[in-house]
Image (cartoon, coloured by chain):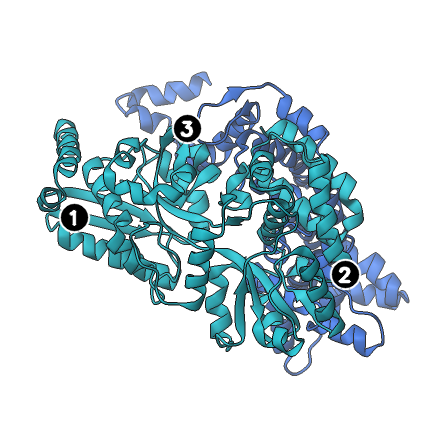
Amino acid sequence: MSDVSGRITPRAQRGWYKRNEIALTPWLFLLPGVLFFAVYVVFPILQSFNISFYKWDGLGEAEYIGLKNYTDLMGDRNFEISLWNNLRWLILYLLAIPAGLMIALFLNQTVTGIRLYKSLFFFPFVISQVVVGLVFSWFYLPDSGLLDSFLQWLGFDGLNVLGNPNYATYGIIAAGLWPQTAYCMILYLTGLNAVDPEQVEAARLDGAKGWRMLWYVIIPQLKPATFIAFVVTIIGALRSFDLISIMTNGGPFGSTRVLSFYMFEKALSEYGFRMGYGAAIAVVLFLIMLLFIAYFLWSMYREERGR
Amino acid sequence: MKSFASWSATAAVTAVMASQAFADGHALSGDLVIFSDMSNPAPRAVMEGMVERFGEMHPDLNIELTIIDREAYKTQIRNFLTADAPDVANWYAANRMRPYVEAGLFADISDLWAEPEFESLASTRGAMTIDGAQYGVPYTYYQWGVYYREDIYNELGLSEPTNWEEELSNCQAIIDSGRACYTIGTKFLWTAGGWFDYLNMRTNGYDFHASLLAGNESWQSDEVRATFENWRTLIDMGAFIDNHQSYSWQEALPFMVEGEAAAYLMGNFAVQPLRDAGLTDDQLGFYQFPTITEGVALAEDAPTDTFHIPSGAKNVAAAEEFLRFVVSAENQTIINAGDALGQLPINANSSVDDDKFLNEGFAMLSSNSPGGVAQFFDRDAPAEMAAIAMEGLQEFMVFPDNLDDILARLEDARGSVY
């Protein structure tokens, strides 16, 4: 250290910034990002935590009520329904990953027009969720929908998927899987480009084929793609909102609510005046997301250290 | 500026008190900012027309009209009232305005209501009053009732029912002919609220209904159960179309147009789409919801749409003058005409446009609604209670057996909401 400062002393007339340039510049580049992140992400999160301790209609004075919003949540049947639905979304949405992999493997070949087929399979991800929701709600329409006509043609009774509290959530998840599968497919398609042909060749010489080839040779090499697919699917499942709002509006009788939708209903919708309660739901949702995000960050960190 | 505004406000008030002619000549100036939710094509034209006519009367006044999508308005109003309030804003009567009144965001305009011209609005005074003061003025309202396929009734030899027995026997005849008595779409819940309003007001009367929605009666009381019992009679008969929980109110219209259902309990706004779909006035009829309990005075739903002055208004004098203009008999005749809003004027001195349904509705509300006039389920009950209750009503219509559970839930909500 001492000889470094010794070398600098002769040029002591340099400005303060010049002297600290190496240390400061990264922060200067980071500053806009950090500032926006703090104002638009970190601060609102803290604010939500704060509001969740108040009873507030969004207009008048907020009244501090401690943990009452949270104890109310414990006894709220709609909250329980939303939580279970979130779990259904989380588990069933993961089906998009193997489905996307299958389609990617199927499309990973060179035949005439493969680009066209690939874009057709990718198409559902490009169109808006609102359109997906509308298309599926027409598909499920009782009496006149495609599904109903098909079932009746097969000789079954018609089924009002979105009008039945037992099936409605699954119906919406199926609609959500359509674009999500396309997303996972595109991730795997790029991943498959990076698969080392020499390893495949070597495995083939050793007699590996079919499932064993897939499981022991291909899939391990697709690990980065799987990781990203996992992250986007989990987060996609937790923030499901558009499809529910379009297809059932939370109904029938609230059976398709998830936490994000319930929060919107309680705090921001036409009849929602319970900002504190909505904030409490948001905090719970945030904590659930935090579990996954922490896990993802941790495994990313471990990955980078391993290199 | 402030002193000028208050000076001109007093001047305007005294001027109107003194003489109408002088008030008309009184010059207003500055900016008048109006936020409106009249975003559908016909209401939009009405709103723009009103601003234009008002502008001609007050050439020095610079009017800025902002029209916001009707649904988006319902959530945006909270933001603009607290942040940057306009001088005049649209909203709804009764409990729907209570949160804003209690938060002090709507200005008390009782002095305006004290003026003699406002006596012709007496019918809605109650709906605009909270804790003894008035907070807005009405510009239109519309009747609810049963719109039915007159040709189907004629074909089956039925007449408009006036009591519950006739209602049930009519309905049975319609069902026997392979149709549903009523179409309804409950996806967005409020349509079920309309049914509850009528069944409860006919079974237990207006006063009980109002008191229930104000939180003073138990949802598990015998009276409420009697209402649901009547409703259940209809449901068990198969009176309503299947799968109504999947349709919006518009999506339920084709059932009536195609003759799969014979009637629709709806507001007068349903007439336009039914006519557009090809039903003529010979095919389409209207009747008042029949009596259920003998001796209970008939009461109706007639939701009122309103204008308010936010507390943060900057040009109060111009805003008050605009409200006077809105409620004037002449203006209400123009804006509620069949080619404009196609609804009913509030001002008793206005004339109702010559339209079959407007005439019937006006006659019903002015002479055959002795029990009172309710706003609507989700305007009379507090927002949170309305949301929870309407969900329960929808569930009841699909699974009537869940009634005990639903009522227990509503009673529970009553404990926490009020």
Gap between marks 1 and 3 measured at Cα:
29 Å
Say above or below: B70 vs B240: above
- Residue B237: assigned label: 2
Q: Chain of mark 1?
A: B
Residue A210's x, y, as percent? Answer: 87, 67
* Residue A37 shown left or right of residue B236 in the figure: left
Residue at mark 3: B103
Task: Identify which amino acid the numbered label 1 is placed on.
Answer: Asn
User: Judging from the image, what is the letter of the chain drawn in blue?
Assistant: A
Quick one: A125 or B404, which is closer to the camera?
A: B404
Same subunit: marks 3 and 2: yes
Q: Nearer the viewer, residue A211 or B157?
A: B157
CA separation, marks 1 and 2? 60 Å
Q: Is residue B210 left or right of residue A2?
A: right
Chain in cyan, by letter, is: B
Q: Which corner quadrant of the image does residue B213 belong to?
A: top right
The residue carrying pointer 2 sits among few (fewer than 14), some (14 to 19) or many (20 or more) residues within 10 Å by Cα, namely some
